[in-house]
Every structure is written in C-alpha cells, then in structure tokens.
Image: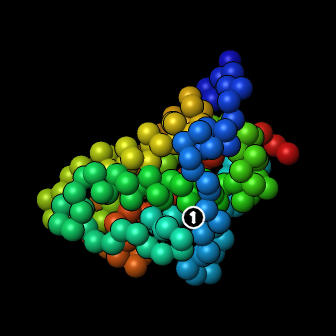
C-alpha cells in the first residue's frame, strides 16, 4: 500500500464536521487577482487563507506581542477551516470532502514579534484540527514560517495541498 492510500474511514469529513458542530463557511473571496483554490490532476492547492469569520479578519497583529500562543493557534485553525472551505468548493460542496485522500502539506506563515520562535506550535492549531476532520488522511507535511508582515496584518496565513480521488 502506497503512502496516502490507507483504508478510508467510513466516517466522512462532513460527518466529523457535523459532530463537531462546524458548518463550513463560504469559500473566501480572493483579495486580489487569483483564485482561492485550483485543481490540477489529483491535487488541489489553495491560496493563502486568513483567519476570517463571517468574511471579517478575526485576528490581526503579531504573536508574542498582540496575541499569545493559544490565540494564535485558534487563528491557524480558522485559516485551516477557510482552506477546507476552498477545497470543498472545488469538490462541489462539503460532501465532496469524502474524495480527499490525503492532506499532503500545510504551509503556514505566522506574523511574529521579534524573538518569537514558536511558529510550529501555532500551526499545531491547524494540524490538529485537520487530523480531527480527516483522521489519518489529515496528517501532513508542514512548513511553519515566521513573517514580519502578512496581508491586512493577519496573525496567520495558511495554504493547503490536498490529494483527491479523481472525479
């Protein structure tokens, strides 16, 4: 069995989201001249997602200055939620998430105060949430980067690479 081809749980991502009381938001509207997600073969790649709630930025400012680790991890979870909403949009809705074979990679940028070096701990908020939604298929590789500036002063920006069953 190849990596990422583990037996799929009978519990769908949609069912797990419902059990957690989570409704996916609409796919975020791009802030510029790009698309929120793009399908290429069996991969879906999302653009960078921000911690939006109801279309408004929920977390701004640097971690280690404005926000502590717990708040930043919640911002990362919101970014992951919006990225999954973009993936679901590519797949025709929340039920389409059953086609996700593997979250391959998470790329996260954390707006960091000077000296802050716990970017991996911040992104655990996203990684743990993705594992809760997709089970073993949600385990992924990851890049956790510190940044001195992010769009709109967002606390976290995150992108996903997801492998899916072809339609």
Q: How is the image coloured?
A: rainbow
- Choose top left, top right, bottom left or bottom right for residue 13: top right
Give the residue displayed 45% in from the left and 64% down from the top.
51
Q: Is residue 64 above or below residue 14?
A: below
Q: Residue furthest top?
A: 1
- Choose top left, top right, bottom left or bottom right for residue 93: bottom right
Q: Is residue 67 left or right of residue 134?
A: left
- Rate crowding at label 1 as few (under 14), some (14 to 19) or many (20 or more) other CA atoms within 10 Å: some
150 vs 129, nearest the viewer: 129
Q: Is residue 20 left or right of residue 76?
A: right
Q: Is residue 97 visible?
A: yes
Q: Is residue 5 visible?
A: no
Q: How many marks?
A: 1
Give the residue displayed 62% in from the left and 56% down from the top.
24
138 vs 26, nearest the viewer: 26
Query: Which quarter of the image is occupied by the C terminus?
Result: top right
Give the residue displayed 55% in from the left and 60% down from the top.
82
- Choose top left, top right, bottom left or bottom right for residue 124: top left
Give the residue displayed 54% in from the left and 55% down from the top.
81
Q: Is residue 48 above or below residue 5?
A: below
Q: Residue furthest right?
A: 167
Instruction: Provide the secondary structure element on which disc 1 rests.
Output: loop
Residue 138 screen position, x and y as percent? 55, 37
Q: Is residue 152 above or below residue 83?
A: below
Query: Which quarter of the image is occupied by the N terminus?
Result: top right
Residue 15 screen position, x and y as percent? 67, 38
Task: List the residue tagged with mark 1.
Answer: 47
158 vs 22, nearest the viewer: 22
Q: Is residue 20 above or below residue 78?
A: above
């Amino acid at each position: 069995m190849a990596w990422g081809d583990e037996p799929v749980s009978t519990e769908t991502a949609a069912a797990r989201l419902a059990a957690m009381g989570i409704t996916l938001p609409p796919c975020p509207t791009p802030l510029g001249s790009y698309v929120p997600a793009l399908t290429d073969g069996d991969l879906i790649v999302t653009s960078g997602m921000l911690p939006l709630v109801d279309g408004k930025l929920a977390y701004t400012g640097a971690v280690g200055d404005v926000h502590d680790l717990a708040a930043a991890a919640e911002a990362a979870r919101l970014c992951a939620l919006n990225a999954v909403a973009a993936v679901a949009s590519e797949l025709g809705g929340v039920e389409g998430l059953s086609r996700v074979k593997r979250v391959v990679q998470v790329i996260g940028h954390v707006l960091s105060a000077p000296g802050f070096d716990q970017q991996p701990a911040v992104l655990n908020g996203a990684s743990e949430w993705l594992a809760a939604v997709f089970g073993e298929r949600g385990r992924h590789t990851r890049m956790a980067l510190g940044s001195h500036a992010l769009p709109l002063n967002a606390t976290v920006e995150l992108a996903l690479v997801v492998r899916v069953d072809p339609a």
